[in-house]
Image (spheres, grey):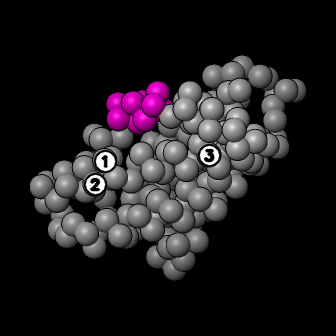
Amino acid sequence: MAGLWRSYQALMTKYPWTVQIVTAGSLVGVGDVISQQLIERRGLANHSVRRTTKMMSIGFFFVGPVVGGWYKVLDKLVMGGTKSAALKKMLFDQAGFAPCFLGAFLLISGTLNGLTVDENVAKLKRDYTDALISNYYLWPPVQIANFYFIPLHHRLAVVQIVAVVWNSYLSWKANKM
């Protein structure tokens, strides 16, 4: 396991942006597999590989680049590694970024699932508030710790590890018709 971590660190040093995006996409996919198998109890015979592929594409092309870029912007908006700076970053993240990101995530997943604009808006109206409240139960303490203890280039990976649980929930929420 230590060797795997060292390899990941080496790749992160050499190709930080690519590794962050691949990590995000892969872990969004893991979240969907967990959603289908443990939450929805579909079984392997009824597992939708197409759905997992869609969720991974959201991770690769939306979650990874957007969250990775947001952390860079946030580090420029709020400088320093103090407890106060971590709290300010968490507040910016949860009050400004999270509501927009969550709405965009649900809209993108609805679009990839073939929903019409009206169906997508109705689904967003139905699911957004519940998902946002759930977000506020999980993410504020995670983000304070992330912003205080974790270097910038590892923040997306740390968040995505915690997000395996969150991604399972989001995948279930996004794909519940």
| C-alpha gap between disc 1 and disc 3 | 19 Å
> Which of disc 2 and disc 3 is earlier in sequence?
2
Is residue 70 part of the magenta span, yes or no?
A: no
Task: Examine the image and state in which quarter residue 31 appears.
Answer: top right
Secondary structure state at the residue bearing disc 1:
helix
- Name the kind of residue labelled 2 in the image: Phe
Q: Residues within 10 Å of mark 3 (few under 14, many from 20)?
A: many
Q: Is residue 79 above or below residue 92?
A: below
Question: How far, Cα to Cα, is label 1 from label 2?
Answer: 5 Å
Q: Which mark is residue 47?
A: none
x then y, percent, for residue 130: 47, 27
- Badge 2 is on which residue? 92
Total of numbered circles in the picture? 3
Majority secondary structure of magenta residues? helix
Residue drawn 55% across the image and 50% down it: 104
Residue at (72% x, 20% y) in the render: 41
- Of the residues under marks 1 and 3, which one precedes in the sequence? 1
Residue at 65%, 53% in the rendered image: 58
The magenta segment: 129-138
Query: What's the amino acid at mark 1?
Result: Ala
111 and 91: which one is in front? 111
Give neighbour class at mark 1: few <14, some 14-19, many 20+ (Cα, 10 Å).
few
Instruction: Note whether residue 64 is visible.
Output: yes
Residue closer to the observer: 3 or 151: 151
Residue at which label 3 appears: 107
Residue situated in front as seen by the camera: 4 or 86: 86
Q: Which residue is mark 1?
A: 95
Q: Are marks 1 and 2 in contact (CB under 8 Å)?
A: yes
* Residue 52 shows in this picture: no
Quadrant of the rendered structure where residue 124 is? top right
**Element type at mark 2:** helix
Quadrant position of residue 38: top right
